[in-house]
Image: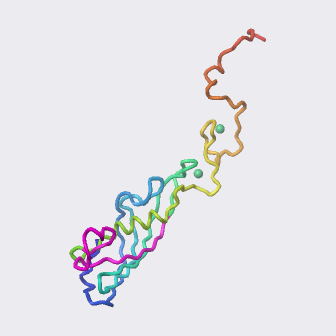
Amino acid sequence: MLDTRELGRRPGSQREVSRTVPAPADLGIEVLHVPEGAPVELDLRLEAVMEGVLVTGSARAGLEGECVRCLEPISDDVEVTFQELFLYPDHRISDEEDDDVSTLEDDLLDLEPLLRDAVVLALPFQPVCEDDCPGLCPDCGARLADDPDHTHDAAIDPRWAGLAGLDLGSAPGE
Ligand SMILES: [Zn+2]
Ligand SMILES: [Zn+2]
């Protein structure tokens, strides 16, 4: 929440705000997100216009997640930019039609939905540790990037793996 009272309502007045806020829960996607409470650096410009306050800004934060192919932990960072007009409550046309419109409440503006949308849009849907991550061995689950050349002597169909130890028909000592 950001207080806009200092800005006043005179169209054209501007204020720059830089602050670091703790990340809200669920900022990002399951496989790649900003840990709750981690610092999010905000640089904002607030500009009073006729209908409300125009917010233009950027946010930077660290990300944690895991590679969707090999499950290795990933750390990365994200920088997003956003712009949104927050209307004064008395400039809302109707409550029903304006559900998608951001509104100031008691001179406070809530950046969280804006930040959340911007971060989610900026993230890859399928984060990987490296672009060419080969993933996991389908036979043993080893991480192939660590051990790219390992092989398995006989690829055993898992349906028959239980029978592999049985000696079917051949005489002992043969
Ligand atoms: Zn990987
Ligand atoms: Zn393997």
Q: Magenta segment range?
A: 77-104
**Is-magenta flag for residue 37?**
no
Colour scheme employed for the rendering of this structure: rainbow
Rendered view: 89 above or below 38: below
Q: Residue at x 67, y 29 (%)?
A: 156
Asked whether 129 or 156 is in front, the reply is: 156
User: Vertical placement of 91 versus 161: above or below?
Assistant: below
Name the side, left or right, on which 115 lies relative to 69: left
- The picture places residue 107, in percent across and down from the top left corner, at 23, 77
Residue 125 drawn at (x, y percent) = 51, 57
From the viewer's perspective, tell me whether residue 81 is left or right of residue 104: right
Residue at the image position 66 percent from the left and 21 percent from the top: 164
Residue 64 in the image, given as x and y percentages of width and height: 47, 57
In the image, residue 173 lies at what x, y percent? 76, 10
Q: Residue at x 69, y 32 (%)?
A: 155
Q: Quarter of the image holding residue 151? A: top right
Quick check: 155 above or below 22?
A: above
Q: Is residue 142 above or below residue 87?
A: above
In reply to whether residue 98 is colored magenta, the answer given is yes
Locate the N terminus by quadrant: bottom left
Q: Is residue 121 left or right of residue 158?
A: left
Picture quarter containing residue 152? top right
Kindly give the residue lying farthest to the top in the view shown.
171
